[in-house]
Image: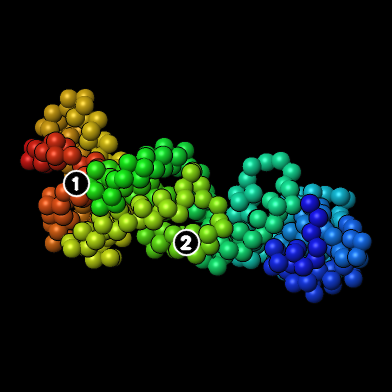
């Protein structure tokens, strides 16, 4: 695949003037020319441009960029590693640079020799991501995604099936899947609703970005409508700040409720020390979720007691609630 200078400039965000300058100083010479004399760039040229832009963003002068890129025929990844090793001595600046390069490696994860479109896509994708998130946020997002990536495809498949059956977003029957989505998203982003909101905005405003795990914009709009229904009901009881606390503690609640289910399945009586410890931990987590405000805790309990839509798909079943109350009484 050969690109003319104008097309390369358009797809990478590098100006035509800069590409001409790189050619004139011998930093990036096109591999060929068309019959009409137009510059033509191949995959290796695009890879070299990727290296130039990465090193320039590190603050490396153009006079030194060529030396790094031509140093013994090293691969770009080795050049980046060597540059990182040097910059690590400048602690604050080096840390930010290392994080950005880590995100680049995650974006390009997959192995093999990247093709022209891979380099172009990675340059464009990083540029888009950085309009919405800091490098540190991106690094955290990609690292945490790996921890839960295997759980998304089956959930997405189940939601697609609900869409195909014509289940409306406000249906109670859909809420178990909505609850799974919320719990998984909360684990992915540590309950940060503001971050998840920005991620959703990015996907809608930048439709060219690839979506993972079989997702598409139609599915995102569908599940977003169902989540809005759930959050709208919750808003009758909790402020946005209080809802944020609830989402922050979702992983802890999931672990605690799983612990309670195991105790019940094993036949542990509510009077047993393990059950009483569960009740104490439950009360402590409720207190933390409510921001140590008893009135907020009461409203939270009332929401889940009174609202069928919130009860649907909730791991805290009536049987488990009764078990915890008995353990607390014991």
**Which residue does the image show at 78% across and 72% down from the upper left?**
16
Judge from the rendering whether residue 126 lies leftward or rightward of residue 158; answer left or right.
right
What secondary structure is marked by label 2? helix
Crowding near the residue tagged with mark 2, few <14, some 14–19, many ≥20 C-alpha atoms within 10 Å: some
Q: Nearer the viewer, residue 9 or 135?
A: 9
Q: Residue furthest left?
A: 329
Q: Quadrant of the C terminus?
A: top left
| Image x and y of residue 118, in percent | 69, 51
Residue under label 2: 204
**Alpha-carbon distance for marks 2 and 1?**
30 Å
Q: Nearer the viewer, residue 134 or 26?
A: 26
Q: Are marks 2 and 1 in contact (CB under 8 Å)?
A: no
**Which residue does the image show at 84% across and 71% down from the upper left?**
20
| Image x and y of residue 260, in percent | 22, 35
Crowding near the residue tagged with mark 1, few <14, some 14–19, many ≥20 C-alpha atoms within 10 Å: some
Q: Is residue 104 above or below residue 323?
A: below
Mark 2 or mark 1: whose residue is earlier in sequence:
2
């Amino acid at each position: 695949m050969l690109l003319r200078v104008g097309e390369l400039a358009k797809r990478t965000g590098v100006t035509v003037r800069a590409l001409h300058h790189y050619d004139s100083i011998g930093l990036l010479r096109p591999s060929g020319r068309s019959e009409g004399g137009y510059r033509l760039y191949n995959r290796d040229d695009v890879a070299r441009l990727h290296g130039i832009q990465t090193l320039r963003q590190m603050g490396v002068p153009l006079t030194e960029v060529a030396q790094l890129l031509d140093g013994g025929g090293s691969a770009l990844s080795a050049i980046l590693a060597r540059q990182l090793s040097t910059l690590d001595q400048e602690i604050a600046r080096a840390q930010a640079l290392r994080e950005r390069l880590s995100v680049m490696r995650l974006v390009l994860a997959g192995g093999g020799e990247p093709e022209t479109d891979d380099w172009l896509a990675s340059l464009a994708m990083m540029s888009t991501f950085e309009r919405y998130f800091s490098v540190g946020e991106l690094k955290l997002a990609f690292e945490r995604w790996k921890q839960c990536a295997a759980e998304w495809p089956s959930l997405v498949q189940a939601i697609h099936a609900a869409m195909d059956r014509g289940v409306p977003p406000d249906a109670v029957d859909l809420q178990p899947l909505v609850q799974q989505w919320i719990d998984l998203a909360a684990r992915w982003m540590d309950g940060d609703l503001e971050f998840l909101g920005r991620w959703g905005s990015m996907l809608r405003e930048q439709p060219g970005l690839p979506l993972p795990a079989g997702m598409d914009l139609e599915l995102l709009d569908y599940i977003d409508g169902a989540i809005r229904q759930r959050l709208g009901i919750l808003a009758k009881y909790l402020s946005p700040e209080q809802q944020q606390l609830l989402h922050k503690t979702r992983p802890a609640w999931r672990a605690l409720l799983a612990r309670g289910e195991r105790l019940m399945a094993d036949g542990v009586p509510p009077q047993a020390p393990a059950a009483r410890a569960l009740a104490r931990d439950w009360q402590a987590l409720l207190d933390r979720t409510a921001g140590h405000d008893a009135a907020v805790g009461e409203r939270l309990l009332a929401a889940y007691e009174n609202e069928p839509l919130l009860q649907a798909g909730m791991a805290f079943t009536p049987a488990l609630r009764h078990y915890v109350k008995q353990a607390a009484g014991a």
